[in-house]
Amino acid sequence: MDEPLTRAAAKAAPVIATSTVLILGRIWNANGAEHSTGNAALMVVLAAGAATAGVFASAGRSGDGVLAGTAFATSGALTLAGVAGYADGWSLPVLLWAVATAVAYGVAARHWRTDRRDTTAHQRATAVRREDHAHAERVEAIRGRTQIEVAREGGAYAQALAAALTARAAMPGYDPTAIETTGLPRLPELLAHDTTKER
């Protein structure tokens, strides 16, 4: 629920920002900035200073993209506010507002694409890691079940053999020396051999 609201707010941010600057510029116009050369000169100096700061921030290999972007956005906002405050009609400020909004959406769309690519790559990597862990867990579970079954079958075999030899010893006419002379192992040796094989 919060994610769609956050996404919608991010999509609306550029138009909200440029509209706010336009409204403030027109309020400034209504309060005496219309055709005021001093106010227009002030906005030109501020916008040029912000643009210059953006150029210096983006210069060289170690240029800071975030700082440069902020400086250029500030320069554009000051230009829009200056035009909206100085002009006597709505046509030029609205035209400049439309251009500024389009540029803002163009810059934002590039960042949104990069974020979407990074998010998709992260989700894929997470899914691959999760699948690898699940596969390893399944293999270990199968191995554990197999070892339990082998141990259970070996134990059942040893018990059946012991029961058979005990039953044979209880029968009349049983001769343990006859078993030894035929080369068959005695019961303790047989059980020890079977236990070693299980391990």
Image: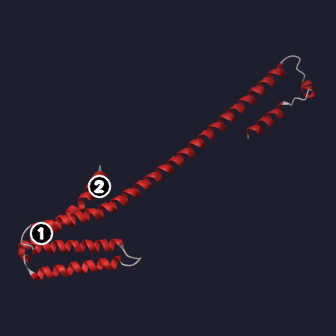
- The percent coordinates of residue 173 (x first, y second) are 89, 17
Task: Report the front residue among 13 and 113.
Answer: 113
Q: In the picture provided, is 77 more to the left or to the right than 56?
A: left
Amino acid type, residue under disc 1 in the picture: Leu
Q: Quadrant of the C terminus?
A: top right
Q: Residue at x 47, y 53 (%)?
A: 125
Q: Earlier in the sequence, mark 2 or mark 1?
A: 2
Residue holding disc 1:
92
98 horizontally vs 116: left or right: left
Q: Which residue is mark 2?
A: 7
Label 2 and label 1: CA atoms lie apart by 31 Å
Query: Which residue is painted at 17% across and 71% down in the image?
Result: 80
Residue 59, by quadrant, is bottom left
Badge 2 amino acid: Arg
Q: Residue at x 66, y 34 (%)?
A: 149
Q: Residues within 10 Å of mark 1 (few under 14, many from 20)?
A: some
Badge number at residue 185: none
* Local secondary structure at mark 1: helix
Rendered view: 52 above or below 22: below
Please say if 137 is above or below 151: below
Query: In the image, residue 78 lies at what x, y percent?
Result: 19, 74
Check disc 2 and report its element: helix, strand or loop: helix
Horizontal arrangement in the rendering, residue 137 relative to residue 85 (left or right): right
Residue nearer the viewer, 172 or 121: 121
